Image: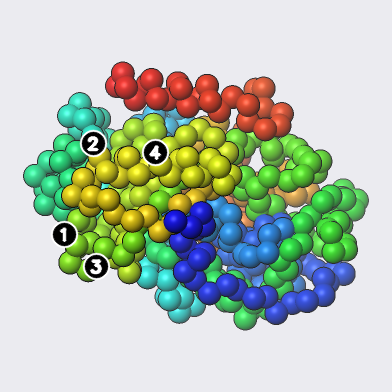
Amino acid sequence: MKLDSYWTDSAPAFVPQARELPAQVDVAIVGGGFTGLSAALALAKRGATVAVLEAGERVAAEASGRNGGHVNNGLAVDYAEVAAKVGVERARAWYRAYDDAVDTVARLVRDEAIACDFLRNGKLKLATRPNQMAALERSAERLIADGVDSEVEILDAARVHAEVQSERFHGGLLYKRSGQMHMGRFAQGLAAAAERSGAQIHTGTSVRRLERLGQGHAHRLHTERGTVSAQQVLLATGATRHGGYGSFGWLRRRIVPIGSFIVVTEPLGADRAQALLSARRTYVTVANIHHYFRLTADHRLVFGGRARFAVSSPQTDAASGEILRAGLAETFPQLGAVRLDYCWGGLVDMTQDRLPHAGERNGLYYAMGYSGHGTQMSVHMGERMAAVMGGDALANPWQGRDWPAIPGHFGPPWFLPAIGLYYTLKDRLA
């Protein structure tokens, strides 16, 4: 079993054409994940000179390439809860921003001819207990009543069992606008598209310090390979951990890096895979510590979850893989002792309200905090922030939001075990 992401291991590595670091650009982007690559493509098409500075040796190798492969619409938190806090109009706009985000991914796949097995078969949110169905039914009724999503549909246990070969589920809520894709191939195609449009991509280029030049947006970026001056800077680093907080301290106090873990089976064969999940949607269970799963184009089962509240590392990934193996066996016992070919973990850039944050502070633009719901929103926000940086302030669907620091969060997330215990108990008592 490889302790490596299936998405990056089964996709061709993108090899940047750029060699020398430019002395001056219009826009420097810190982070070569989906946000950074999407922004680079949009900015370069606008005619800006762009340099993407990625600390790792491969683009989209962190959260963008270490997720479950879902491209889902719908908020990461319950719509009704959000509406109660901020009002129906704002909550509706945020929900629809996720619809727009899936549309953005679909458009880029089409327009840039990215071969990434993109499918739009929907997401099914599954109840593992009978009492969870009432909550799903209330969610569907509210989404329809508020004119947010008229396409959602409740499926009873029989309909769920007809497409999910498991006895665990008592029904589900179907979101019909969701999709899925091969993350590694999408990343390679998005990076190639950005480069074709004129953007420079520099891997192995960690930004150590940001130096503001005057009172505007211009900055000098100090990297391990030299310095770059830019008229504008976009921070698109997500939950990436830097050697020191330094220039990124303000953001780090507002994001908690939480591990999420995934296993991928050996190829099951077309018939066995079709029998297991006949509608080939993305699936997620109703729980705080939940499972999510889907099939791949080569008929593997991708099965993930927040198996442990720990930061990803080879040791925690392997331990979490064993927890997920047990969860997979409970969900699909008919698979028996199926071989697991891949196991990995990744960091979710969780915010306190579990919603994205994007804007401008002290001359720096930023977009991050996708909270485990970021595949589509990161791509979308790259485009949106490119428009903001071009002068369209209204392009940012998350503008004007307060982002207070998380109390007690100054460095590594020491409180994760306590949070994990809290959510475990909450799930058991629900």
Give yes or no for contact between labels 1 and 4 (Cβ–Cβ under 8 Å): no
Residue type, numbered disc 1: Ala
Give yes or no for contact between labels 4 and 2 (Cβ–Cβ under 8 Å): no
Residue that carries the numbered disc 4 in the rendered image: 323
Which numbered tag is attached to residue 269? 3
- How far apart in space, not on screen, are marks 3 and 4 (Cα)? 25 Å
> Looking at the image, is 168 positioned above or below residue 178?
above
Residue displayed at 42% across by 32% down: 82
Residue that carries the numbered disc 2 in the rendered image: 127
State the residue in front, 39 or 93. Answer: 39
Q: Position of residue 113 (x, y in %)?
A: 45, 79
- How far apart in space, not on screen, are marks 3 and 1 (Cα)? 10 Å
Q: Position of residue 287 (x, y in %)?
A: 34, 33
- How far apart in space, not on screen, are marks 2 and 1 (Cα)? 20 Å
Query: Closer to us: mark 2 or mark 3?
Result: 3
Mark found first going from the N terminus, 4 or 2: 2
Residue 366 seen: yes
Mark found first going from the N terminus, 2 or 1: 2
Mark found first going from the N terminus, 3 or 4: 3
Residue displayed at 88% across by 62% down: 227
Residue type, numbered disc 3: Gly
Query: Closer to us: mark 4 or mark 2?
Result: 4
In the rendered view of the protein, which quadrant contains the C terminus?
top left
- How far apart in space, not on screen, are marks 2 and 3 (Cα)? 28 Å
> Looking at the image, is 297 positioned above or below residue 75?
below
> Looking at the image, is 338 positioned above or below residue 326?
below
Residue that carries the numbered disc 1 in the rendered image: 275
Q: Position of residue 153 (x, y in %)?
A: 20, 46
Q: Residues within 10 Å of mark 2 (few under 14, many from 20)?
A: many
